[in-house]
Amino acid sequence: MTFEELRSRALVCTACPLSERRTNVVFGEGDPSSPLVLVGEGPGDQEDKSGRPFVGRAGQLLDKALVEAGLSRETVYICNTVKCRAADWSTGKPQNRPPTDQETVACRQWLLPQLAMIAPTVILCVGAPSAKNLIRKNFAITKERGLYNECEYAKTAIATLHPSYILRQQRPDNDGGYGLLVADIRKAWDAAVRLREKMG
Ligand code: URA
């Protein structure tokens, strides 16, 4: 199967209930030959509407951090743990929520082949659900972010704080962890370049 075939199949997926309320499947975008893949949590409202990952407020902060780390969206590949928006609809106004274990497992049928085809040198897990899915179930993001981890899907994986979390933590005198996000992106990219050179 080609990457485009995988995308076409994912775009019509009905494997879990998230498919019932979605506007668009957010497959991922960027450079599929990049040594670095960022895997976030899942689409929010803006991403669901546009079909593109990380384009809302959190995405804008991620873009800024990528630029500050010397990169851009075009130099990496960006996708998510689940490809459809997870939200609580019980109050009438949808509230984003983390994907459930069942939703995460259902969406592995797209994420894992996607990662296998890209074959990144380094995966940067953006937020806890991604780290728990790709590194270890009991991953503790605040203690373990910024460190190298064994990972089945790349030479190494690093986890970082999610930009939505950073936005919630920010105060006039506190960057909410934004500096750590920039440092983790930089570390992941440096490792990706170094390891890819070593592999020849
Ligand atoms: N948050 C994510 O984890 N992924 C997106 O695509 C957007 C917001």
Image: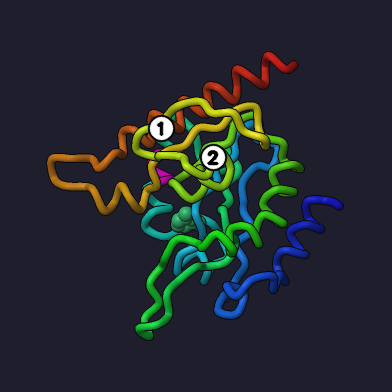
Residue wearing tag 1? 144
Q: Residues within 10 Å of mark 2 (few under 14, many from 20)?
A: some
Q: Is residue 56 left or right of residue 36?
A: left
Q: Which three-letter amino acid code belongs to the residue tagged 1?
A: Glu
Q: Is mark 1 within 8 Å of ligand 1?
A: no
Could you say which is closer to the camera, residue 32 or residue 99?
99
Q: Nearer the viewer, residue 188 or 60?
A: 188
Residue pictured at 51% horizontal, 25% vertical: 148
The answer to whether 200 appears left or right of 91 in the picture is right
Distance between the alpha carbons at the discs numbered 2 and 1: 11 Å
Residue pictured at 57% horizontal, 75% vertical: 22
> Residue 15, percent across and down?
69, 70
Circle 1 packing at 10 Å, graded few (<14), some (14-19), many (20+), is some
Residue 63 part of the magenta segment: yes
Vertical position of residue 37 compared to residue 10: above or below = above
Q: In this rendering, is residue 46 above or below 135?
A: below
Task: Examine the structure image and report whether residue 144 is included in the region drawn in magenta.
Answer: no
Which residues fall within the magenta stretch? 62-66
- Residue visible at 51% across and 63% down in the picture: 100
- Snapshot colouring: rainbow
Residue under the image location 30 percent in, 47 percent down: 166
In the rendered image, which residue does mark 2 sit on?
136
Callout 2 secondary element: loop
